[in-house]
Image (tube, rainbow, N blue to C red):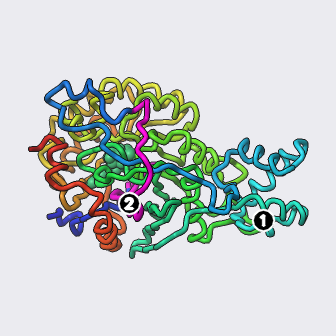
Amino acid sequence: MGDPSLGLPLLTSLHSHVSSQEATECPRGFSARTAFFFGIYRPDPLYPASDPKMSADPMTANAPITQDVVTIPRKDTPADGRLNLVGLTREGLREALISVGTPEKQAKMRVNQIWQWIYHWGVRDFDAMTNLAKAYRATLADNFVIAVPEVVSRQISDDGTRKYLVRIAGGHEVETVYIPEDERGTLCISSQVGCTLTCSFCHTGTQKLVRNLTPAEIVGQIMVARDDLGEWPERGVGSGETGPRLLSNIVLMGMGEPLYNFEAVRDAMQIAMDGEGIALSRRRITLSTSGVVPEIARTAEEIGCMLAVSFHATTDEVRDKLVPINKRWPIAELLEALKGYPKASNSERITFEYVMLKGVNDSDEDARQLVQLIKGIPAKINLIPFNEWPGAPYKRSDWARIRAFADIIYKAGYASPIRTPRGEDIMAACGQLKSATERARKSRAEIAAEAGLT
Ligand code: SAH
Ligand code: SF4
């Protein structure tokens, strides 16, 4: 049962908000509906699915870092062979234009023009690009498309939260959630269908099918949300940081581990940050990682956005069970990597996400230990009341416990907002999504075994 002070028990997702102004957060509980199942599993040389070193330790042997998943090959080109211009970097767009006969000397100007049509004005039809000659528009239409994912369904909560189910190539579906607040609107986007990591409290981690999203599919989630919000600028109205901002912040906290899909996430965020298009400042983008240590410095250098880390535990023993990637990069290594982040990315502080699991990680001692661990790192701690889902091997901490935990952190000088649910009334449909993925999900026994709870 959920805590009455938090509203109804949430079965699938927690749509939440943080009271602090600058904090960025995301609803949780993304569930993929994966209609088709084809392709081959290609092990990633950097992150092999099983690591012999790991299974040597009986303490942690039962929780794999990555599970036995099927990774679906990606294809960005529609069936008719025309290339999708969405998701290409400026350089990629330049090459594409040259490949269809655009003179090199004109290429830079054409990139600027087309970029603005796509990302500033939200145009999807080459014919609307009125500053280009008719014949050139025809050449573009013969060779390219401007394609974004298709919105399969949209639900709007009483509190204004909007949840989109978007379909991407191959028939896969991911969720994107828009959370309006007084001073800003946050879009929570997905970077993968499912996730290869197996965090034992996370619903997404129980799905066996995984596919990396392409840059087009990542930036496309922003574009379809803007379509729906009617937020492409009108002539004479400012845009970017100066214009109306329903969609003012992005959090990469949907489905998937963004740092396991680094290049695509980077390219998509660079497009979102480009001043002549969507123009979101890097401080308004927060990437959440479970702790992929080798990619953290790269995130600072190549993206430079705000960073959130799914910390969730104060000892390696507990974190190994909650966030199994900890066995590969334990707390000390993670903290070391995090220390350098604010400076390298010129961002003020790191957000530590901490899910409150009853009797697992929520003691006063944990709170004190957490404060000790993060000493020296400019930080804020987001406390996330656990969002229960059927088969979940944990319970949400009691409200009083969460408050006591928050209090200790707050008194130690850190902001410690507690996320409260948003969009509860549209949660029901998540159950429908889940039932469709039931066959791709693990049993309660499997999840409990992997979490080391049996
Ligand atoms: N893979 C990335 C980003 C997606 S998860 C990551 O792990 O950071 C976004 C946040 O939701 C993470 O902090 C994650 O730990 C948290 N989360 C996952 N499942 C949850 C649940 N059932 N209840 C509450 N928070 C959850
Ligand atoms: Fe879930 Fe994030 Fe863990 Fe993946 S890395 S299983 S999305 S919490």
Asked whether residue 42 is drawn in magenta, I would say: yes
Q: Position of residue 228 (x, y in %)?
A: 56, 71
- Hey, which quadrant is residue 230 in on the image? bottom right
Which residue appears at 38% of the width and 64% of the height?
Answer: 33
Residue 366 position within the rendered picture, expressed as x and y whole percent measured from the top left: 19, 36
Check contact, mark 1 vs mark 2: CB within 8 A. no
Residue drawn at 43 percent across, 30 percent down: 46
In the rendering, which numbered label is found on residue 32?
Answer: 2
Q: Is residue 64 above or below residue 284?
A: above
Residue 95 is tagged as none
**Real-space Cα separation, disc 1 to disc 2, in angstroms:** 33 Å
Mark 2 CB lies closer than 8 A to ligand 2: no
Q: Residue at x 23, y 68 (%)?
A: 7
Query: Which amino acid type is marked by label 2?
Result: Ala
Eyeballing the image, is 334 above or below 215? above
Read off the magenta span: 18-47
Q: Secondary structure at mark 2?
A: loop
Q: Residue 37: x percent and y percent?
A: 40, 58
Instruction: Pick whichever, 78 or 437, lies toward us.
Output: 78
Left or right for 332, reference 179: left
Q: What residue did someone put label 1 on? A: 126
Drawn side of residue 20 relative to residue 68, left or right: right
Element at badge 1? helix
Front position in the image: 175 or 80: 80
| Quarter of the C terminus within the rendering | top left
The tag earlier along the polypeptide, 1 or 2, is: 2
Q: Residue furthest left?
A: 454
